[in-house]
Image (cartoon, rainbow, N blue to C red):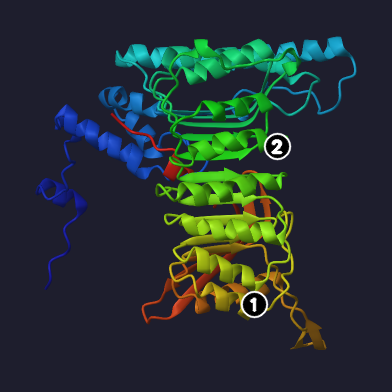
Amino acid sequence: MASPAPSPSSERASGTERQVFPILQLPPEILLSVIQHVDVGTRSSSPTFPCGPSKELLHLSEASTYLHTLCRPLIWRSVNWEPESIRPPSRRPRQVIDDVEAAREYAARVSKWKVRGMRSLLALMQDAQESTRGPIKIKALSYTGYDDGEFGDDSIAAEPDVEALCDVLNVHGRQIQVMFLKSVVVGQELGRSLILDILALPKLSALRLNSVTITDQSKALDFFDHSMGALPPLRTLQIMHGSPKLLQLVGLMTDLHSLLLWPGSRQFGFLTPFIVRLLPQLRLLSLDSVSEPGVFDALAEAFKDMSKSQTLPLEELFLEGRQSLPRRQILLESLSHLPKLQRLALYHLREVQPRLIADIAHYTPQLTALTLIHGDTSSSVYWPSALKDYVDELKKLKRLEFFAWDRRSPPAPRIARTSEEGEDEERPSQLRLEYSTLHSLGKGLPGLKEAVCVTQDVSEGSSGYFAEYSMTQGGARKVDVRKKTVRDFLVGFERWCIIVDD
């Protein structure tokens, strides 16, 4: 007769239970290496970087006082300050405040609450510094202001908050390498102080300014003068909307690797000489909402002239702006002078014929990613030719792994359907239509890994039908299509906003 299985208690008594690994007995340098791997290795890359510490690191820091001491500096590695963390507990309904004094009083009450929130962040940093007996090394800082138009002058409520932000930069900013600012509205003097404090960060390599507005510029405000001193080693600069004066930053840069511009004024003319001067170093160039065709003409001429004496390092090029067909042809021809170009995106093309793709394949056969947008991406549109005509030209791009367009699949004929209620007809859903289109793309382009039919594109997100291609165990081509909204899939900020750890 078989003996009964031993009970868990008897197993423990016999000494067969699994032993817990004595992690705290590891040498400190090995333990710290493990902690750093937990933090960095599990943090998913994000175009809205920085995204803060991993949950695993936070849990590990709660395990013991010793681990908390080791983990706390890493917890402060990325600080992401969102508006939800600073909004007052009770808010006035969104409306226009006619009474100026009432608006100022309300803004002052909001400011007092906000400054406690931002000052509390500074206090937490100070507490962390004292408990670890060492500096708090913030490597990345993301700050989103409180700007939703609830009161007349947003800068009234923002100033105490921005003053606290400046204190954070001055006290704990010497290690910051990546900084994002969004929805900041301040007056002239504080705005100048904020920008100069940012430019004084000695290790700053990536700066993103999204809707940073400095008011009262009628006084001929000029942030940048000879008293600024040495600039930080900026490699990535992005300026979206906000004050035109901030575009002066471009003229100060000497060694940028990536430049992304979307000025609210849509005026690039005065920036063109500075952009051309940076081309020998640029690996990424993105110009959004260009209203002056001469900007693209100048780029095309620079590509051709500079290539005679050097190899331009440009890997990614994103251009949005209307052009006549002759001017667009000149621009396409100039791309043949960019041998390292891998990713290309062109917007506002209008009447996209298969011939356009044929020209792109002829001048830039090395492309691995291509985005073609017919209109302004407010919605997908019908393209003039049949799907097969475009696929035949795309096949000429032998290395293509990613393709996006705003082509809307034309409606299919109604399909007869029989039910208990009798015969009926139904039209295939748009998802089914786009699935069929994306499946045809994957079938015709065996090297394709991802494809997108863009239905809407805004400043920081894109909606559409996303397809991922893979191979089954039997060797068949598999496509997974879903409709979703993602952060900007064109520019992978994780490639350009890189933190270097000590």
Residue 177 appears in the picture as rendered: yes
Is 177 drawn above or below residue 199 in the view shown?
Answer: below
Give the residue number, with chain letter if any, for mark 1. 387
| Residue topped by disc 2 | 267
Name the residue rendered at 58%, 35% in the picture: 273
Q: Residue at x 45, y 78 (%)?
A: 477
**Residue 22 drawn at (x, y percent):** 16, 36
Which quadrant is the C terminus positioned in? top left
Residue 484 in the image, given as x and y percentages of width and height: 61, 57
Mark 2: amino acid: Gln
What x and y, as percent, mark residue 108? 73, 11
Circle 2: element type:
loop
Dot 1 falls on a residue whose secondary structure is: helix
CA separation in Å, label 1 and label 2? 36 Å
- Relative to residue 104, is residue 11 depicted above or below? below
**70 sits to left or right of 453:** left
